[in-house]
Amino acid sequence: MDVEKRSVDKAAQKMINVMDEAGIENVWDRLEKQQPQCGFGKSGVCCRICSMGPCRITKKASHGVCGADVDTIVARAFLRAVAGGTSAHSDHGRTVAEVFLAAARGEAKDYRIKDSVKLHVLAKELEVETKDRSDNEIAEDVGKIALGEFGKSEGTQLMVKRAPKPRQEIWEKQGVTPRAIDREVVEAMHRSTMGVDQNYKSLLRHASKTALADGWGGSMLATDLQDILFGTPSPGKGEVNLGVISSDQVNIIVHGHDPLMSEIMVDAANDPEILEKAKAAGAKGINVAGVCCTANEMLVRHGVPIAGNFMCQELAIATGAIEMMAVDVQCVMQGIGKVAEKFHTKLFTTAHQAEMVGVEHIPFDEQNAMETAKKMVIAAIDNYKNRGDVNIPKEKETGVMGFTNESIKYMLGGRFRASYRPLNDNIMNGKIRGIAAIVGCTNPKVPMDSTHIALSKELIKRNVLVLTTGCATVACGKCAMLHPKEALELAGEGLREVCETVGMPPILACGSCIDNSRLLVASSEIVAEGGLGEDLSELPLAGACLESVTEKATAIGQYFVASGVYVIFGEDLFQYMGSENVANYLLGGIEEDFGGKWGLENDPIKAAELMLAHIESKRDALGLSDKQERKLYTMEERRALEL
Ligand code: NFS
Ligand code: SF4
């Protein structure tokens, strides 16, 4: 076992070795046992959606039993992945909307509206009357409208109006302005079932529509409602990596995505009576830490430390120091159950959508949130006495996280003149070449964190401002790249100068994966600020996710592409290249329809080159290229100009 091939993170390496010596299996071991993985699956050319199959496309068999060709089979697989991802983000969003509404009605006693300013902004956008009304009255109307977005029978998504006008027109023209989120997901499943849509182009068009229902619908609503309910994050310091696990406190890990449970868990762990109980059990206190996107959510709002990203979930348990892990939805590996069995760690599932065999299920609902959270925290305290030997890596780093559209504008312009103007100006004058979004997961097929780190380093070195979300953020955090001083030292001269002047780091940690919607809003406001074109597709902007894992990542990639952005994924991880037509469309033709396209590259430095080339071509198109500025005019040209 070559531990360096598994992860570049020292803490993870240590725990991988610990697990190896103890003979406890983890995600990397299971990947090895899966080798060789099926080539048909890798390229998306297998189909098992009806029982005439399973079918796979080979030289000998160019069509499935029903006659489906390779284009249809691959496009269907892609659409279904996008639908899966969209459903995940949106079911999360809907749950938040339900609790939001219950809180507004006073039916969820442990939740209340925290950000009244953002509530008023959203109310105005949704045309909800605010005059002479209490926050709860306003929130009730906002909540009803928000909830309606998931299943309304008529009309299109309201948040798409945040996009620049020309973008909305492109969506109209392409027929992809998303309707109710549920409807797009249902239609995706319908179109892709046996014997329905058999044109790869219309299947892929619906993938855009479904993905847009995610980015500009479910994810965006989730982010906005969470901000109003739990407070809009502002940049703050936090600690990242397995070293945040405490040797003398009761350790609780919250894992998953939906902050409804983890928010209350943090409060429960701070309850004086509960703390007393922890002390009585011989612990110094209670340490709540996060894994996966819940970790991002908790850090940006409460400074709760991050124990790790996706592939650290088993490693955290293997420290032997976790009294309890509470999981809700998404990115929870079933493998944690087996690891927890080897230690004293108590696992709880909490979401009504997600249970695990052999794991106690404690349904978490808004009516008795605090009571349920306390029950779990007490179980953790009671479990402290069962702790055996521990192996806690010492590695941890500090970083600044929690940037939002609002806080970036504030940093740039100050409280009274919050605006993107200084950013746009510095992009226009070339000190900042452009903006990159580095997002997504960690995948055992790639040395953990390696691409996110290398890519961000390369881009800031070349004067590209980096915005990051999800597990990529945690990767950056673990190697001190979210530390403003250390990151600034790696930044190119122009970027560094701007960042130092306004007091912002060159890598902005923007939260969890649903918070990618923040990037859509920020990009739209950058366009509105002026000087960088009229549409998102004109911006010197590119995105990347080189360690993608989930269907959610595919949905995110597709909504960025359909919003006009160039998005690069890891070539070996993108499982839809078995059809030439689908490949040609996603990697090229789609640009004519939407202004954005996919790119594939495994190597982070080459990916950075591709992103930079794209950024420079957009600068050229905007007339911002240095070459043009330095152009020496002939006498004739000058005369022509003067005319
Ligand atoms: Ni995003 Fe977050 Fe991580 Fe990937 Fe999973 S935790 S929602 S999907 S693995 S970044
Ligand atoms: Fe085979 Fe067609 Fe059925 Fe898919 S839908 S399994 S290609 S027969």
Image (tube, rainbow, N blue to C red):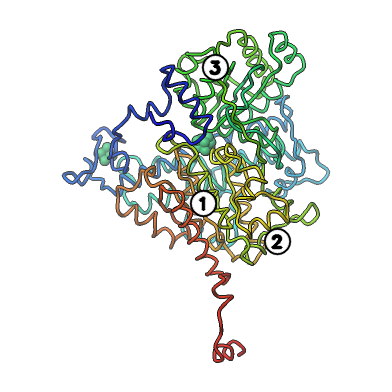
Q: Quick one: SS at disc 3? A: loop
Dot 3, how many residues are within 10 Å of its Cα: few (below 14), some (14-19), or many (20+)?
Answer: many
Q: Residue 512 at x, y = what percent?
A: 59, 39
Q: Residue 180 at x, y = what percent?
A: 53, 44
Q: CA distance from mark 1 to mark 3?
A: 38 Å
Image quadrant containing the N terminus: top left
Is residue 150 in sight in this rendering? no
Residue under pointer 1: 543
| Label located before the other in sequence (1 or 2) | 2
| Label located before the other in sequence (3 or 2) | 3
Residue under pointer 2: 421
Q: Front-most of 593 and 626?
A: 626
Q: Quadrant of residue 307?
A: top right
Q: Which residue shows up at 40% across the image and 37% down it?
A: 445
Image quadrant containing the C terminus: bottom right
Dot 2, how many residues are within 10 Å of its Cα: few (below 14), some (14-19), or many (20+)?
Answer: some
Q: Quadrant of residue 166?
A: bottom right
Amino acid marked by disc 3: Gly
Residue under pointer 3: 320
Q: How many marks?
A: 3
